[in-house]
Image (tube, helix red, strand yellow):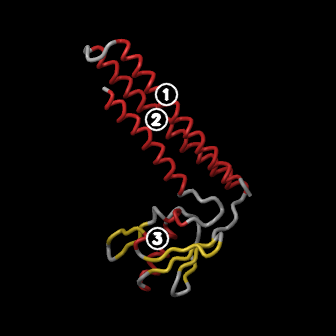
Amino acid sequence: MQDKIKLHEEKMGKSIDVLQEEFVTIRAGRANPHVLDKIKVDYYGTPTPLQQLGNISVPEARMIVIQPWEKALLKEIEKAINMSDLGIHPTNDGSVIRLVFPELTEERRHELAKDIKKKGEAAKVAVRNIRRDAIELIKKAEKAGEISEDEMKKFDDKVQKATDKSIEKIDGLVDAKTKEIMKV
């Protein structure tokens, strides 16, 4: 039973990891190469992550430069960025692609803050669903006579503490990302 509880705690940790990955892709007014993580480029008929097709650098606080290893890919990379939900238009000078990030408007900051809260709530729901599954598992084990009532209460407490800790961590991540976005 201890192993099964541990597995549920690991699932809660994975929910937090997914949230952190999503937060990395939200741009906060300055250039972050991770905003390109989800962009796939058509490379000879195969959708390929942009990072595998060239060198990505951040020469200035609000600019990303993409230097593809093959010049022929410039048009495809430009097309992929335009089709993405990044909201930035690439500048192609024939050898590199530049992405200039404009300052975020107050309205856009509030939209991003709402989106951050929504993603945080989704992560909390995932953690609560994992808690529910763990508690069901504990109750079934108690009914089947595999564990005593005292052990059931002990495991319930352990699951609840892991849930509380996970939700507290999610709240901290949401607050930190919201402050980062709202900072001018």
Residue located at (33% from left, 24% from top): 137
Instruction: Name above or below for residue 36 compared with residue 169.
Output: below
Task: Pinpoint residue 84: horizontal percent, then vertical percent.
Answer: 50, 64
- Alpha carbons under labels 2 and 3: distance apart: 34 Å
Q: Helix, strand or loop at disc 2?
A: helix
Residue mark closest to the camera, 2 vs 3: 2
Q: Which residue is mark 3?
A: 80
Instruction: Name above or below for residue 110 compared with residue 68.
Output: above
Mark carried by residue 178:
none
Task: Give, as a three-letter code, the residue at label 1.
Answer: Lys
Q: Where the N terminus falls, by quadrant?
A: top left
Cβ atoms at labels 1 and 3 below 8 Å apart: no
Pick the residue in front: 59 or 133: 59
Q: Is residue 113 left or right of residue 42?
A: right
Residue located at (50% from left, 47% from top): 19
Task: Pinpoint residue 20: horizontal percent, then vertical percent.
Answer: 51, 50
Task: Pinpoint residue 108: horizontal percent, then vertical percent.
Answer: 67, 55
Q: Callout 2 environment at 10 Å: few (<14), some (14 to 19), or many (20+)?
A: many
Q: Helix, strand or loop at disc 3?
A: helix
Pick the residue in front: 8 or 75: 8
Residue located at (62% from left, 50% from top): 177
Q: Helix, strand or loop at disc 1?
A: helix
Q: Which residue is mark 2?
A: 127
Mark carried by residue 161:
1
Residue located at (34% from left, 21% from top): 138
Task: Give, as a three-letter code, the residue at label 3.
Answer: Ala
* Mark nearer the N terminus (1 vs 3): 3
Task: Give, as a three-letter code, the residue at label 2.
Answer: Val
